[in-house]
Amino acid sequence: MTAQPTRLSLASLAGHVPAGPGSSHDAVRGPAVDPRSTTVGIVHLGVGAFHRAHQAVFTEDAAAAGGEACWGILGVTQRSARVADQLLPQDGLYSVLTKGRDSTSLRVIGSMRGAAFLRDHSEHVLDTIAATTTHIVSSTVTEKGYRRTTSGGPDLTDPDLAADVAVLSAELGRTTTSGRGGVIGGAGPARTPIGALVRGLARRHTLHGAPLTVVCCDNMVDNGKVVAALVRGVIEAVPGARAEALRVWLEESVRFPVTMVDRITPATNDAHRAEATALLGLRDDALVVAEPFSQWVIEDDFAGPRPRWELAGATLTGDVAPYERAKLRMLNGAHSTIAYLGALRGHRTIDEAMTDEQVVSVARRLMAQDVAPTLDPPLGLDLDRYREQILERFANPTTGYTTMQVAVDGSQKLPIRLLGTVADRLTAGVVPAAATRAVAAWVVFVARRADVTGRELPLDDPHAALLRAAAAGSDDGLTDRMLALGEVFPSELSGHDGFRAALRAEVADLLSMVPAR
């Protein structure tokens, strides 16, 4: 029987990769900071693979570049204890296996200085949010994790969030000898990220009132504003003078900067684990995998100290919107275009679709001819270079995206990724050819639900029933029936004769390519 490799930890790392700033050997690097002397200054809610491959790496590099040892991270898991259970026996250490088309490297990260499962360790999490040494609470909990209503407020009918609000109300109703009013603690575990955040803020306000910055890193438009509205909504759901005092302090002392994040992090598989073990000589149960590219744009609006993320390559700006618009329309718009056209043409993965010139040419024309004229790029963003960089990233076979993964939820993605571009070009007097073909590919994807070989293409969409009903009927009327869906197409598009005619032609061409079943 082959012996299992020793597991990664502070003790075992010293015998393989020298720990400490700048350590490296061949394709393997040790932590850029000394984990033993790094203290927690950030609480991160939702410590999944993306955070560990993105913000945690930026933070470690910023701390190393700035010579600061106060930016360690307490990583908090909410849905399960799995990641915390992986990290704790490894003293918070984990590695990032970076996979390019022609290169591979491994880096051990030392900035994760603690891990906690929210429901089991709520008091520790809330105490750390409240600590004067904590200056940032960040989050990557996915859009669903924020428990929002369709109008954007907190869903107070959600049983877990409702439980958090009830506990917050009880906690704010207590008394304390601190002179600030409202003792916090012991009333029950936090169940949701927003509940934990608001309860932690309430505890901080009660104990000392030091300022704090909340940095949302989820892929939501105006993500900081979204979280700020949720926090306010939860506080407003609690009656009483102490809740009002908390709300006033929030407006004065807490900031919610908007951010834009980008890095592809494929799911870690056994082959990745074997490759990492061969490189490091240690078993890493918390391994994450990432592409070489990484981008972080942050609104420069902080309530107190922060890591010097700009020293690590992040962009600090007064306005994130131009970066976000470019990403949504160029990167995400091209991604959806490649997914729908590629799926129809029988390609199972995005990188495979990138070998098909008929797919790639549409994506390239979309970005160059349709999207670029709608953008006002910020200083330093070269759209031509950005376009080619996007295409290179999509062609990387190690990212592992399938066309069907990207194709899900099309009715929600299309308005943000493609239809805004169409609307802007129509306003400018131009019917955008590539964007129209991309929209047609989605229409045919919905209608045919199969590729050129007859392989089924399942429809995974929150409006699936509505879409199927619209798609049912003759091919001749398909375009008009789909354009009538107000849930997807705004009136300025569905009522534009030029766009309707162009879309009919593109849909007819693609329908002829994919036979009806």
Image: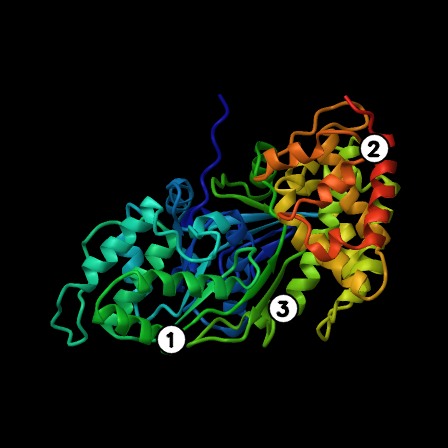
Q: Which residue is mark 1?
A: 251
Q: Which mark is residue 375?
A: none
Callout 1 crowding tier (Cα within 10 Å): few <14, some 14–19, many ≥20 = few
Q: Earlier in the sequence, mark 3 or mark 2?
A: 3
Q: Are marks 3 and 1 in contact (CB under 8 Å)?
A: no
The answer to which of 98 and 107 lies nearer the viewer is 98
What residue is rendered at 51% in x and 52% in y? 52
Query: Is residue 165 left or right of 1 when viewed as pictured?
Result: left
CA gap, disc 3 and disc 2:
37 Å
Does the rendering let one see residue 303?
yes
Q: Position of residue 369 (x, y in %)?
A: 85, 59
Q: Is residue 303 above or below residue 134?
A: below
Query: Is residue 186 left or right of 254 when viewed as pictured?
Result: left
The answer to which of 114 and 175 lies nearer the viewer is 175
Q: Is residue 347 above or below residue 13?
A: above
Q: Which residue is mark 2?
A: 511
- Corner quadrant of residue 101: top right
Q: Which amino acid type is marked by label 3?
A: Ala
Q: Position of residue 320 (x, y in %)?
A: 61, 69
Q: Which amino acid type is marked by label 2?
A: Leu
What residue is rendered at 80% in x and 61% in y? 426
Q: Which amino acid type is marked by label 1?
A: Glu
Q: Earlier in the sequence, mark 3 or mark 1?
A: 1
Q: Are marks 1 and 2 in contact (CB under 8 Å)?
A: no
What residue is rendered at 80% in x and 51% in y? 435
The answer to which of 136 and 414 lies nearer the viewer is 414
Q: Which residue is mark 3?
A: 321
The answer to which of 453 and 415 lies nearer the viewer is 415
Q: Earlier in the sequence, mark 1 or mark 2?
A: 1
